[in-house]
Image: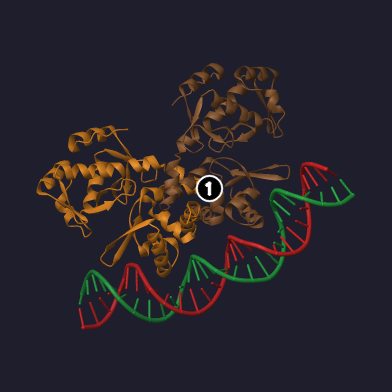
Chain colours: A orange, B brown, C green, D red
Amino acid sequence: MDAEVSIAVVAALVGDPARARMLTALMDGRARTAKELAYGAGVTPQTASSHLAKLLRASLLAMERQGRHRYFRLATPSVGHAVEALMAVSPTRARARASEAPLDGLRLARTCYDHLAGRLGVSVTEAMVRRRVLKPSGRDFLLTPAGTRFLGRLGVDVEKIRGERRAFARQCLDWSERRPHLAGSLGAAVARQCLDLRWVRRVGEERTLVLTLQGLRGLRTWFGINWKR
Amino acid sequence: MDAEVSIAVVAALVGDPARARMLTALMDGRARTAKELAYGAGVTPQTASSHLAKLLRASLLAMERQGRHRYFRLATPSVGHAVEALMAVSPTRARARASEAPLDGLRLARTCYDHLAGRLGVSVTEAMVRRRVLKPSGRDFLLTPAGTRFLGRLGVDVEKIRGERRAFARQCLDWSERRPHLAGSLGAAVARQCLDLRWVRRVGEERTLVLTLQGLRGLRTWFGINWKR
DNA sequence: TCCATAGTTCGATGGTAGTCGATCTATTCA
DNA sequence: TGAATAGATCGACTACCATCGAACTATGGA
């Protein structure tokens, strides 16, 4: 098969409405289960299963098993770029939505669900690993005793959020950074604290975050991060 | 129709092998006739006509009538970007070809058929218009008397190339720049002279050109162009 | 005026792929 | 161990669409 046709194969995959909806649903970098994607795309789980298998086989999506769930996410950043480039040549509404949330803003700092993602999320997570606050462990993070004290000084009540029913400190893979960031109830608490401390501020209705001046200082003194741009 | 589905419409258009071949054939920015595209794509003219009509209706292509010919080209740079982004997620060979001829190189300076295109072609053309060497006129350029003398000093024998059978000084629209550059026998002669004067050099087998040091000086003294990068 | 050529339109045909119901497997939880 | 849920597989149905032959329109040249 020659090069021209191989782009047609990929385009044809994106060219089905149900698959296009699944791909755009995954554009925020979060992983989702097959059922979520099925209902989001407006098709039955059987149909979705067939679509997801095709997207997997073409390496547009990546999949991770977790119990009886299967989590799907965009396989590489270039998949996201391709979807965006298609949005740019689509009529009116797709273009409008794409320009509302410019990629660079999204990529630098955004929330993913309720925790920090994008470059900021990854930076903070990696700083916590470097400073022995977190330790990667399987698909989770372990919070060290020193880490518990550290977060306590920052104003995060670790004992309280341990009591919550949801996963405590999950690794969440980032579409744009290809590196994991902190999710779960701990991730949400850290994000909440960053907002409360006025380190970051939400812009618009979107998931985009901007770093404040206090945030710049806070990241340096607490995490040793010298944020640029 | 919502945004997700509208990207599917575009992707489905690119998702047909014949149409994908037509689009990639147009990636160099040149306009081509329906027949050229038909045979290039390996389908009959009837089939190609149907494909081209669809691509036109979706504004992926633009068309210009010229006598009994119809010239098709990519409608906007973003169409080219979308095709490239799809190449980037396509298996092996498409990716290899895309990286062989990086977009930036192509965009800065390249030949289109036999004349200068890309940013260089547009810059030189616009400089000639600014200096009253050329005057836009319909789909052609007119060469002024002063322009004839100017090109003569540069070493282009205008009278001789006026004798050639092909169009003399055509405006050729550039995909990447969205602005016209000089084509036709005069455009070819100017490009030949730039190569003879060692202002530009071909790199590889591709249409990419690099500007030499002499070229940098030549552009400044002859055309008042301060080329950057 | 006539012929050659570029391109489109129409209609028939055939293949492909999305869809869902029914059924099956795997995992979790009580 | 059994019930519930996530998901995959299979098969049948349907609808769409790429393709090409034939016929048509339009432009250019002799």
Instruction: Please determine whether, in this image, residue B99 is positioned above or below residue B190.
Output: below
Q: Answer with the quarter of the image where residue A197 lies.
A: top left
Secondary structure at numbered mark 1: helix
The amino acid on which the numbered mark 1 sits, given as a three-letter code, is Thr
- Name the chain under label 1: B
Instruction: Please determine whether, in this image, residue C14 is positioned above or below residue A182.
Output: below
Residue B44 coordinates in the image, percent (x, y): 64, 57
Whether residue B164 sits left or right of residue A163 in the image: it is right
Whether residue B156 sits left or right of residue C18 in the image: it is right
Residue B73 coordinates in the image, percent (x, y): 60, 43
In this rendering, does residue A155 appear at all?
no
In this rendering, does residue B15 appear at all?
yes
**Which image quarter holds the C terminus of chain B?**
top left
Instruction: Please determine whether, in this image, residue B182 is positioned above or below residue D10.
Output: above
- Number of residue marks: 1
- Judging by the rendered image, the residue that carries numbered circle 1 is B24
Observer-nearest residue: B66 or C22?
B66
Residue B106 coordinates in the image, percent (x, y): 49, 36
Circle 1 Cα neighbour tier, 10 Å, few/some/many (<14 / 14–19 / ≥20): many
Observer-nearest residue: B209 or A225?
B209
Observer-nearest residue: B23 or B159?
B159
